[in-house]
Image (cartoon, helix red, strand yellow):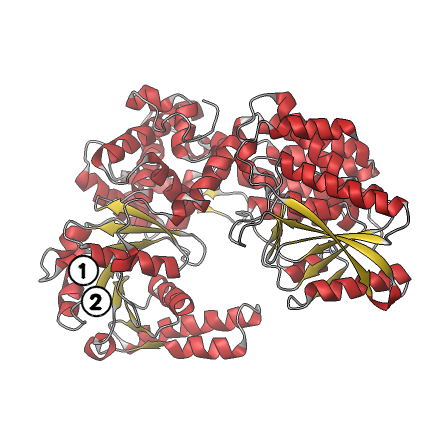
Amino acid sequence: MSSTKELLKGAAELFPDEVVTQAHVRHLDLPGGAGRFALITLDNGLDHTKPTTFGPQSLANLDAAIDQVEAEASKGDIVGVGITGKPFIFAVGADLKGVELLKRHEDALAIGKGGHDVFKRLSALAVPTFAYYNGAAMGGGVEVGLHCSYRTVSKALPAFSLPEVFLGLVPGWGGCALLPNLIGADRAVSVIIENSLNQNKQLKGKQVFDLGIADAIFEGADFLEQSLLWTASVLKGDVEVVRPEIDRSEAWDQAVERGRAIADSKVHGAAPAAYRALDIIAAAKNGDLRAGFDAEDTALADLIMGGELRAGIYAFNLVQKRAKRPAGAPDKNLARPVSKVGVIGAGLMASQLALLFARRLEVPVVLTDIDQERIDKGVGYVHEQIDILLLKGRVNQDKANRLKALVTGALDKTEAFADADFVIEAVFEELGLKQKIFAELEDIIPAEAILATNTSSLSVTEMASKLKHPERVVGFHFFNPVAVLPLLEIVRAEQTDDASLATAFAVSKKLKKTSVLVKDAPAFVVNRILTRFMGEVLGAVDEGTPVEVADRALAPLGLPMSPIVLLDLVGPAVANHVAGTLAAAFPDRFAQSANLGRVVEAGKRNLYLYDSGKPEIDPEVAALFQVGDVVLSEEQVRERALNAIAQEIKLMLDEGVVAEAQDIDLCLITGAGWPFHLGGITPYLDREGVSERVAGRKFLAPGVASVPQ
């Protein structure tokens, strides 16, 4: 035991800024005469916005608490031990701020062993142990509970996950070995691999119970009281916890293979964490927990010292910290209240916006379009989506009725928007049409109302140029699907004033979007970068490189989808239109693909057919192509694409399109699904030497991204 204490003491010296979690022990008499009970509460002494984490000193504090209850259990002074968290928080895992400071493999190994050595003491006590998941539990917070004999969970628990693979680690304090032996390999693969690689999907309390991770579930209001009543019943023998037998047949191997298929589809072999986790799950089939813990220690140390974790932490910090404090946003006190929203257009994008505004702002939202049929279809879509939310239990009947009542349609813009505070247009990408709409609205809406455009590539300044009050026009560029992608590019036109911009940021915050302030430049950030690299891929095809070769070129990056699949998702017509806008603005770097133009002219909506499950070029599309005789390799296409991206990023930074390179990374992660394991595009380009080769310098200052260079 002393070696564990020495290990943690040495590790604590490497974490000088750890926010230390205390492990308070208190005693109580269980109901019904079940006996004296010790309850450990994890608490870092801060409010619930500062989650409880485990650094070396925090682990040492838990270790000391276990020393105390171990002695009490050995003497027969207590009949059981429970562990819970402060209000709203159980524990959210390792202190990542400290993990990224580790420089030596042996130090990283010590962190893994330290966590294991402390947590597994809970399973070795002379009395049963109970974990009470009262609030958010992630990573090591989940794992400390897995080492206990029994677990309860609150129905109100909002977030429960093993997110390590998402960040470039493995669940390294028992998760990979214990979870499949508790709930079976297939369910464990869903939690450890599938949920993590689906943007760190969180489980709710009922899902935790349904999976078999928790043995009982109780309402949040009196969760601890009910958990202790249940504990008493278990200890007295009135309640018997029966868990299903774990299937260790071929089903275990099939579950691991399913996990590998998921990892292949998400990271394409480009990130090791998922595969290391699956190796440990595969080996856990024989139930040898000691070997499993050792394998977790080794994998954890290897991954901590690798680039994937450092990249993941950089990306995590972007979306958790920088996203909450948008660079360049004006004083929030300048924002005006918004009590009614108008949406111009009733197509799919406009309808998605109407639903989002109604759900998040809970104010009246009015859609208009050129005829009643379109309006009815748009309002009908919103109501249908609200019904789906009701069926899924996301809203109750009363809330569904109120949301439906908030969303209406009107042909008469004067009647609809005379009292609107915020009006957004989501019509076809044609500058003249948008200018005409804004000119009509200017004489209808209140003097201080905001005019917002969802344009993806057009000049917001030009759109506002003919208005009497261009200062209230802002770009409000959402990404499709609106409900899924967090990014909102907020565009400041040349005459946009601070009050209008502050209102836009305030609305965005209520919409729960990740806002990035961007300069009014063609296609802004995401579409400009994607169009540039897509242009290189399509250009290679036009020159004579087979579509399949060009499309595989970026596979080593582990992007969520290949360039041509992304093109099909966006739609050839939209992609061609944006390419045209950028080609007009920057003819030296952007061009419209002649072949893509033929695809659009022929009315084809996809380049690929997906009938066989594997994307294959549509023969009708192939017949439209006219290509040259220059055939490039995948490596050559990849080099061209990365060079082009690096050049474009340098120009965007020079032009001041965003404040810093981190904002470009944040845009691509939240608006284009750029994978966390790359840590954003700019650190990737820095690591690969592309930045210095093309731009003459690295994009990120030393220490900004804690990714090995």
Q: Nearer the viewer, residue 651 or 91?
A: 91
Q: Is residue 17 visible?
A: yes
Residue 322 picture location, percent across and down? 39, 43
Find residue 449 and name its label: 2
- Image height of 122 relative to 108, above or below: below
* Relative to 246, 307 lies left or right: left
Tell me whether the residue at label 2 lies in contact with that at label 1, contact meaning CB atoms closer than 8 angstroms: yes
Report the residue at 58% width, 53% height from top.
Answer: 202
The percent position of residue 503, horizontal first and vertical second, equals: 27, 60
The answer to whether 106 appears left or right of 513 in the picture is right
> Between 439 and 516, which is closer to the camera in this rendering?
516
Name the amino acid type tagged 1.
Arg
Q: Where is 580 relative to 543, above or below? A: below
Q: Which mark is residue 135?
A: none
Residue 365 at x, y = what percent?
Answer: 33, 72
- Which residue matches tag 1? 472
Give the residue type that dot 2 points to: Ala
Q: Is residue 494 above or below residue 383?
A: above
Residue at image x 61%, y 37%?
A: 55
Gap between marks 2 and 1 measured at Cα: 7 Å
